[in-house]
Image (cartoon, helix red, strand yellow):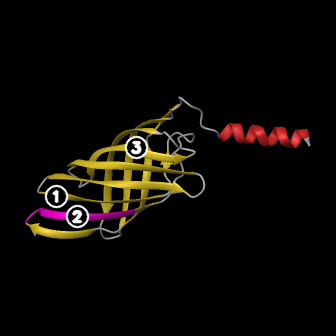
Amino acid sequence: MKLILCAACASFIGTMTFAGQSFDGSGTGSGQSMNEVTVLGEGHMLVQSLSAYEPLATNDPENPMAGLPGKCFGSFEINRASAAGAGHCVFAKEGVSTVVTDWVVTGMTAEGAMTGTWSVIGASGAAAGLTGGGRFSNLSNREAGTFENTITGAVAMP
C-alpha cells in the first residue's frame, strides 16, 4: 500500500506547477475560424472574428497553458496594408484550469497574417495567478476556415 501511495505522490508532484516558476510561452495554436467580413471599400474591411482552438501546442510542456483548448473573439479593421483591433481568448480544461488572455492586432504581414501582442488577464484553477504575454502572428485560410497562430512570449506563476 505504501508503495502505491508513494508512486501516486511522485506522479502528482511531477505534474505540479510550483510558485515562482517561469515558462516559455512560445508555441502554435490552430483550429477553426468563423470570421464575418464587412467590406467598407477597396482594401478596407472590418472583420468580426470567432476562433475555436485545438489544444495549445506549447514549446514548454510544463507551461500551465499547454494542452488547453480555447475560444477567441473580437474584431479588427484592415485598411490597405495596415490592421488594428482587439479581443479576448478563454483557454480552459474543465475541472483543471482556465486562462483568459487579451489580444491586440498591431499590424499585418505581406502574406496577410495579423500580428500583435497578447497578455494573460486572469486565470483560475491550476493556473491561478498566471501572468505573462508576448507576440503573435496569426495566418488564416479564409476558404478552409482554418488558422495557424505562431505565439512567442513567456508566462509565470506567482
Depth check, mark 2 against mark 3: the one in front is 3
Residue 45 within the magenta-colored segment of the rendering? yes
Mark 2 or mark 3, which has the lower sequence index?
Answer: 2
Q: Left of 31 or right of it: where is 48?
A: left
The image shows residue 26 at horizontal and vertical percentages of 43, 41
In the figure, is residue 40 to the left or right of 126? left
Q: CA distance from mark 3 to mark 1?
A: 25 Å
- Judging by the rendered image, the residue that carries numbered circle 3 is 120
Q: x, y (%) of residue 108?
A: 21, 50
Residue behind mark 1: 78
Residue for point 90% across, 39% down? 2
Compare marks 3 and 1 and give the one earlier in the sequence.
1
Name the quarter where the N terminus is drawn.
Answer: top right
Q: Amino acid at mark 2?
A: Val
- The x, y position of residue 16, in whole percent, is 64, 39
The mark tally for this picture is 3
In the rendered structure, find residue 41 and report the number of the disc placed on it.
none
Q: Which residue is mark 2?
A: 47
Q: CA distance from mark 2 to mark 1?
A: 8 Å
Decide if residue 2 is on the left or right side of residue 9. Answer: right
Amino acid, disc 1:
Ile
Q: Which residues are magenta?
A: 42-51
**Nearer to me, 150 or 23:** 23
The first of marks 2 and 1 along the sequence is 2
The Cα atoms of the two marked residues, 2 and 3, are separated by: 23 Å
Evaluate if marks 3 and 1 touch, with contact meaning CB atoms under 8 Å apart.
Answer: no
